Amino acid sequence: MMVTGRMLRGMREEQGYSQAALAKLAGVSQAHIAKIESGRVDPRLSTVNGILAVLEKGRGKPTCGSVMKRHIVSARPEDSVIRLIATMKRLGISQVPVLIRGKNAGSVHEGTIIHNAHRNIRLLRVSDIIDRPFPVVNASDPADMLAPLLDFHPAVLVTEKGRIAGIVTKSDLLKM
């Protein structure tokens, strides 16, 4: 059986890898992956074997990175709680991480807000009601580790290369 660029693309997309992520894991450039998938180059056998090894390794095993949402709505400690509530309502989200210079500093979720409802919310800043930080996992970690974490936390943050890259909530696991 001959492996085609179209087949590689299908396998890559099925597993949720971006071209850049697959390229990094296979040790080639993203541009080279794009050329292989489009059929513009005839890759060396060693390159194809490297790509297939990455795709076979991940087959059937979703990672935290493949489950996460990349768009993270976050708050800063100095943000107004009333504005944060409005944003959460508008976007239909129930929790946000609190970040300081991109670092996980805490969280605010519906329970946090309800717990502080007796206070004058209009005068409060996020720093006044901040809750414990969400747990953090690596994008390459197996996704099956998320469910136990989400039993105790409303969300889990996902890192790539040491930076927060995404978020996973219970509703994301239901989509798997």
Image: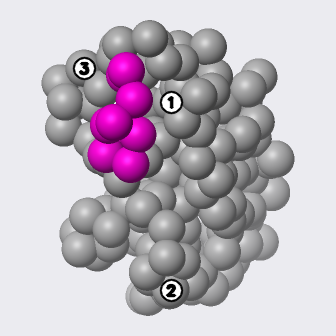
Report the magenta residues as a range.
Answer: 113-121
Q: Nearer the viewer, mark 1 or mark 3?
A: 3
| Residue 27 percent location from the top left of the image | 80, 57
* Disc marking residue 148: 2
Residue for badge 3: 86
Does residue 119 appear anywhere in the picture? yes
| Residue 40 percent location from the top left of the image | 50, 40
| Residue 172 percent location from the top left of the image | 31, 63
Badge 2 or badge 3: first in the primary sequence: 3
Q: Is residue 79 left or right of residue 89?
A: right
| Residue 160 percent location from the top left of the image | 71, 50
Q: Quadrant of residue 163?
A: top right
Viewer-side residue, 41 vs 106: 106
Q: Which three-letter amino acid code belongs to the residue tagged 1?
A: Ser
Residue for badge 1: 74
- Magenta includes 56? no
